[in-house]
Image (cartoon, rainbow, N blue to C red):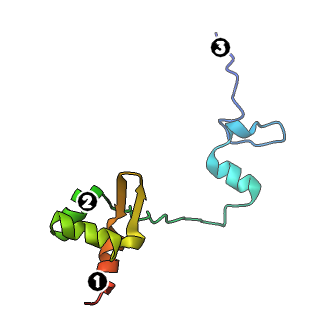
Amino acid sequence: MMQNYKVNQYATGIINDNTPVGALTVGQLREVMGLEAQESIVEIKPKPDKRYVYGLAGIRKLFNVSHATAQRYKDTIIKDAVMQQGRKIVVDADKALELFKEQQY
């Protein structure tokens, strides 16, 4: 007793006009599209995360200064690194340190 097995044409690698795109492997699809010669490796470099400090307490810790000195720095030296909305203060720490280094007394 012989059983008839239906041979799946997709498993055999036969590609014709009736072959659904979803049944192709990536390699077969590249071959059909003519992309087999191109090897494209994209290297993604992560953007360094910005470091923020919050409030006068953050400025005090960043520069290891008193409350009054932190207030003076916020209003003068690191003014371009400070974003303030009402009572909320956010400081870009890297930019603040850079501005502080550029400051000359």
Q: Position of residue 15 (x, y in %)?
A: 76, 43
Check whether the beta carbons of the residues at disc 1 and disc 3 lie within 8 A of each other. Answer: no
Comparing labels 1 and 3, the label whose residue is closer to the camera: 1
> Dividing the picture into quarters, in which one does residue 30 lie?
bottom right
- Pick whichever, 24 or 100, lies toward us: 100
Q: Specify the amino acid type for callout 2.
A: Leu
Name the residue located 74 percent from the left edge and 60 percent from the top edge. 34
Disc 3 element? loop
Residue beneath disc 3: 2
Comparing labels 1 and 2, the label whose residue is closer to the camera: 2
Residue 13 in view here: yes
**In the image as oriented, which residue stretches furthest toward the bottom?**
105
Q: Position of residue 48 (x, y in %)?
A: 39, 65
First in sequence: mark 1 or mark 3?
3
Measured in 3D between alpha carbons, the distance from the residue under mark 1 to the one under mark 2, in whole angstroms, is 19 Å
Quarter holding the N terminus?
Answer: top right
First in sequence: mark 1 or mark 2?
2
Name the residue located 67 percent from the left edge and 61 percent from the top edge. 36
Measured in 3D between alpha carbons, the distance from the residue under mark 1 to the one under mark 3, in whole angstroms, is 86 Å
Q: Specify the amino acid type for callout 3.
A: Met
For residue 16, above or below residue 33: above
Q: Position of residue 57 (x, y in %)?
A: 22, 57
Q: Which mark is on residue 56?
A: 2
> Dividing the picture into quarters, in which one does residue 12 lie?
top right
Q: Position of residue 82 (x, y in %)?
A: 38, 65
